[in-house]
Structure formats: C-alpha cells, structure tokens
Image: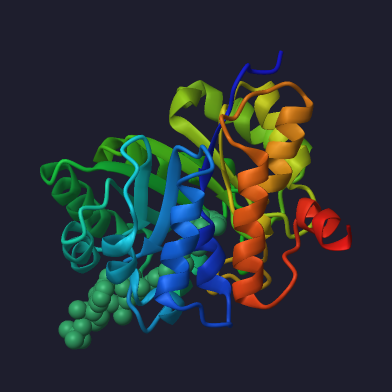
C-alpha cells in the first residue's frame, strides 16, 4: 500500500528563512544551499522574489540565486508573486517559478494584497512569462485546510482555485496547510474530493507542523497515493502573513519516518543532519525537529 519511493522538495531556504527574525548572511544561505545540494535532494526552493519590504529576510534572492553551485540533477526554484518578481527571477536563471495564492479571501489579501479574483490575471501573466522563458511552474494554494482569519474553507472553494491554476498552465500543485490545522481525517476527506478532479502525480502536500499533526497527515496522504511532499529541514518555517503559522513538516523527521518504513527518498541522512546542524549554528537557536532534538541531546 505504501509507495516504493517518495520525492521530498526542500523549502527551508524559502519557507524556513522567510519567518526567521535572526538575520542570516547571504554567504551563509549560499553555503547552506550548497550543502543541501549534496544531500541527494532533487529539488530546493532557494528564495523568494517577493517585495523585499514584505519579506526582508529574502531581499537577497538574486545574490543567493547567482552564487549557489548548480547541481544539474537538482531543480532550483523560487517564489514569484507577479511580473516584477518574474523579471528579477529570470535574471538569475532559476529553473522553476513558484506562484502562490490562498483559497481563503482574507489570507490572500493579507499575504499578497489582492482579492482572489484580482490575483488570477496577475498570476496568469507570470505563468505565461515563465513558460516563454522556458521555466516550469509550480502553483501553491494556501489555507487549504482552514484559514487563520476566515476559519473553515469549503473544499469547493479550494477546488475552484486549483482548477484555475491548472487552467493557467501550472505543471504541479502544492496544497498548503499554512497554519498546521489539518488532521488526518480531514486530509482523507479533502484528498477523496481532489481525486475526482486531479491526477495525484501532479499534487504535492505542504504541511506545517504547528499542532504536531504533519507526519500523521503524511501517512494518510501516502495511503492515498501522494508521493511528493514539501519539507523544511529542522522544522524551520512559517508564513509571516498568517497569524500563528509555525514550522514546516521537518524534512529530517520525514526522511527518518520514510526510511524506517522502507520507503526510499534518495537522501543521505548523515549529510542532511550535517546541513541541519550548520543552519542551526547560524541561526543560533535549536531547531524544532525531533531528529535535531535527538542530535542536540546526544
Ligand atoms: P503591493 O504593495 O500590492 O505591490 O504588494 P504593487 O504591485 O502595488 O507594487 C508596489 C510597488 O512594489 C511597486 O513599486 C512595485 O514595482 C514594487 P513602485 O512603482 O511603487 O516603486 N514591487 C516589487 N518589487 C520587487 N519585487 C516584487 C515586486 N512587486 C511589486 N516582486 C506583493 C504585492 C505581492 C508584491 C506583496 O504583497 C508581496 O510581496 N507579498 C509576499 C508575501 C509573502 O512572501 N508571503 C510568504 C510566502 S507565501 C507562504 O509562505 C505560503 C506557502 O508556504 C504555502 C503554505 O504554507 O500555505 C507558499
Ligand atoms: Mg508554507
């Protein structure tokens, strides 16, 4: 019933660092991403070309993208909210562009300053421009399992936003539990609905571990046939424009669980832990993942 292998997409340098108040030097970000490139990961989201005033932590996206060593087997991606961001991204020869929006009105407005309806044409321009430039495009939908402002989000509303993104021409969709409110039963219900509309080889799950449910939600997703997950090393992460958002599903905890269960990831655990220890030192605080807790106490 479990897949033989799973793809993990590392979003720590973006989703992780966007939420950190401790400033990380550009050269340390570059060194960290270079280490991540050596762990066996096949996908790294390295930064974000959003407005630098909105996310000052990632204002050095261009410098980071230009300085990292490119491993040809790895897709390097970055978040892009609009054409202005796309222009900046294209200068760096990033491989993949990630567009993003929410399935709930209030989070969408707080995060990208537009209504849901106003967002579609802005993102369509990004998708068209990115495709012309030969990039693949990932689409994120946030607040899929609930919104910190609007509460319950009807699954029909989520499906409507997902449909529109696929119509725009995205290659892959990542479903975000932005503030970690999902539980396994809800994930089961949402995926049962999703199954009727979408092929699961185009769907990634993006869990946050705010309430400790992320791995349980992964297990249910695996049972549904989902084989791609986003993670942030050490459990870093969160969206500054979602009240109460905290750490992503920790890549190291996910790799541990999958390997224990005999599911391959292609990732070297020792190298992963070394690179987690590196960014922990640079941040000057303990990372929340269970793997890092074990390491810090041994
Ligand atoms: P806005 O203020 O409405 O932008 O922000 P605007 O289009 O009105 O432009 C205002 C000025 O900003 C203009 O300059 C633009 O050129 C400039 P002026 O003409 O006044 O001199 N500008 C830019 N400059 C640099 N780069 C850009 C850019 N865009 C405009 N890209 C905007 C709208 C979308 C830009 C803003 O709201 C923004 O940057 N938001 C990003 C918020 C964010 O990054 N949130 C976290 C990521 S999402 C997330 O974490 C969830 C996820 O992990 C999944 C999950 O967990 O659910 C993905
Ligand atoms: Mg996120």
The colour mode here is: rainbow
Horizontal arrangement in the rendering, residue 252 relative to residue 29 (left or right): right
Horizontal arrangement in the rendering, residue 226 relative to residue 215 (left or right): left
- Residue depicted at x 61% and y 46%: 271
Location of residue 158 in the rendering, given as x and y in whole percent from the top left corner: 50, 44
- Residue depicted at x 78% and y 39%: 216
Residue 218 occupies which quadrant of the picture? top right
The C terminus sits in image quarter = bottom right
Location of residue 13 in the rendering, given as x and y in whole percent from the top left corner: 49, 61
Location of residue 193 in the rendering, given as x and y in whole percent from the top left corner: 58, 29
- Residue depicted at x 35% and y 42%: 71
Horizontal arrangement in the rendering, residue 79 relative to residue 23 (left or right): left
Task: Report the front residue among 106 and 252.
Answer: 252
Task: Report the front residue among 163 and 226.
Answer: 226
Q: Can I make out residue 199 in this image?
A: yes
Q: Is residue 224 above or below residue 214?
A: above
Q: In this view, does 76 lie above or below 191?
A: below
Q: In which quarter of the image is ligand 1?
A: bottom left
- Residue depicted at x 16% and y 63%: 87
Q: In this view, does 97 lie above or below 242?
A: above
Task: Report the front residue among 78 and 171.
Answer: 78
């Amino acid at each position: 019933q479990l897949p033989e292998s799973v793809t993990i997409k590392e979003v720590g340098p973006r989703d992780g660092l966007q939420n950190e108040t401790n400033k990380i030097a550009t050269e340390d970000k570059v060194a960290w991403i270079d280490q991540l490139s050596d762990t066996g990961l096949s996908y790294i989201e390295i930064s974000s070309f959003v407005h630098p005033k909105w996310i000052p932590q990632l204002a050095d996206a261009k410098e980071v993208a230009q300085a990292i060593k490119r491993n040809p087997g790895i897709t390097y991606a970055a978040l892009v909210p609009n054409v202005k961001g796309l222009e900046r991204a294209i200068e760096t020869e990033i491989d993949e562009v990630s567009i993003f929006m929410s399935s709930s009105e209030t989070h969408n407005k707080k995060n990208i300053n537009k209504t849901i309806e106003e967002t579609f044409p802005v993102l369509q321009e990004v998708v068209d421009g990115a495709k012309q430039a030969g990039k693949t495009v990932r689409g994120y939908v946030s607040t899929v399992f609930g919104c910190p402002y609007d509460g319950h989000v009807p699954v029909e509303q989520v499906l409507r936003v997902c449909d529109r993104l696929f119509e725009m021409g995205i290659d892959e969709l990542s479903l975000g539990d932005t503030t970690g409110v999902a539980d396994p039963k809800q994930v089961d219900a949402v995926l049962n609905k999703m199954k009727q509309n979408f092929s699961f080889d185009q769907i990634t799950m993006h869990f946050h571990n705010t309430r400790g449910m992320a791995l349980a939600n992964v297990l249910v997703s695996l049972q549904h046939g989902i084989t791609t997950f986003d993670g942030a090393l050490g459990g870093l992460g969160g969206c500054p424009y979602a009240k109460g958002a905290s750490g992503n599903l920790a890549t190291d905890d996910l790799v541990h669980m999958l390997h224990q269960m005999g599911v391959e990831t292609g990732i070297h655990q020792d190298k992963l832990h070394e690179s987690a220890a590196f960014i922990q030192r640079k941040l000057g605080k303990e990372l929340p993942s269970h793997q890092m807790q074990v390491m810090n106490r041994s």
